[in-house]
Image (cartoon, rainbow, N blue to C red):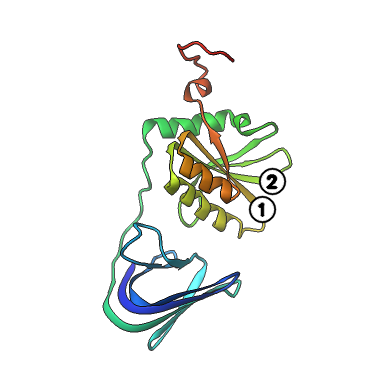
Amino acid sequence: MRLVIARCQVDYAGRVTAHLPMAMRLLLVKADGSVSVHSDDRAYKPLNWMSPPCWVTEEPGTWTVQNKTGEKLVIAIEEMLHDSEHEMGAEPGLVKDGVEAHLQELLAEHIGTLGTGYSLVRREYPTAIGPVDILARDEGGSTVAVEIKRRGEIDGVEQLTRYLELLNRDPLLAPVQGVFAAQQIKPQARTLAEDRGIRCLTLDYDALRGIEPDEFRLF
């Protein structure tokens, strides 16, 4: 991974255009080829980025990041304060907690929970930015990517959004729809997901295990 701290201006040209005026920022160039631009005030989310496959052309004072569709991220560097490269080694992957991992296993076994006619493609479908929990097909044969959480929050929706952006570049899979599945989904996460066309699904852990809860039900 390459870490660069620089005073820079960033312009994106593609499906839309975006401009970041001159300011101090962190530039990350990862081993998968992705380039992202970060500020110091918004946790993990970049201000702008280019996902792989893409390539960087460096000229004095300018980086041009381009992908195969012709989108460009042009970074004009006025001053560079830090530039270093680090070997991160193999990523062992996220270790899910027991409930979350079991939810994935149960949902794969009972894929009809997603809807009538759904079929499982595979669990832990690999992508360049990490595995998708479940890849399935609906009754019409369209691809569906499912992200599973114990508690559904905004960061889970953002994670699924990145997976969908990448998967939809594959002509063998596109169009890919998203399902955000969790035992509990926070209102803000649900609003963001539905705004992005992602379906939300609340999972009943006991029902998936075939265990009726102790409390009485009206329905």
Q: Which disc, if any, is residue 175?
A: 1
Q: Earlier in the sequence, mark 2 or mark 1?
A: 2
The disc labelled 2 sits on which kind of residue? Ser
Q: Residue at x 56, y 53 (%)?
A: 164
Q: Is residue 6 above or below residue 90?
A: below
CA separation in Å, label 2 and label 1: 7 Å
The secondary structure type at the circle numbered 2 is loop
Is label 1 in a helix, a strand or a loop?
loop
> Which residue is found at the position 55% from the left and 33% from the top?
108
Residue 51's x, y, as percent?
Answer: 49, 64
Q: Which residue carries the number 2 mark?
A: 142
Viewer can see residue 34:
no
Q: Is residue 89 shown above or below 24?
A: above
Give residue 110's position: percent from left, percent from top: 58, 28
Residue drawn at x 34%, y 57% is 43
Compared to residue 16, the image places residue 124 above or below, namely above
Q: Residues within 10 Å of mark 1 (few under 14, many from 20)?
A: some
Crowding at dot 2, Cα within 10 Å, few <14 / some 14-19 / many 20+, comes out as some
Please name the amino acid that badge 1 sits on: Pro
On the image, the x and y values in percent for residue 15 come to 60, 69
Q: Quadrant of the N terminus?
A: bottom left
Q: Foreground residue, 104 or 212? A: 212
- Position of 173 compared to 206: left or right? right
- Which quadrant would residue 4 be assigned to in this image? bottom left
Closest to the observer: 216 or 130? 216
Task: Check the image and report above or below for 195 versus 41.
Answer: above
Residue lying furthest bottom in this view? Answer: 60
Please tell me the numbered disc located at residue 116.
none
Nearest the viewer among 137 and 41 is: 41
Residue for point 34% across, 76% down: 23
Cβ–Cβ below 8 Å for labels 2 and 1?
yes
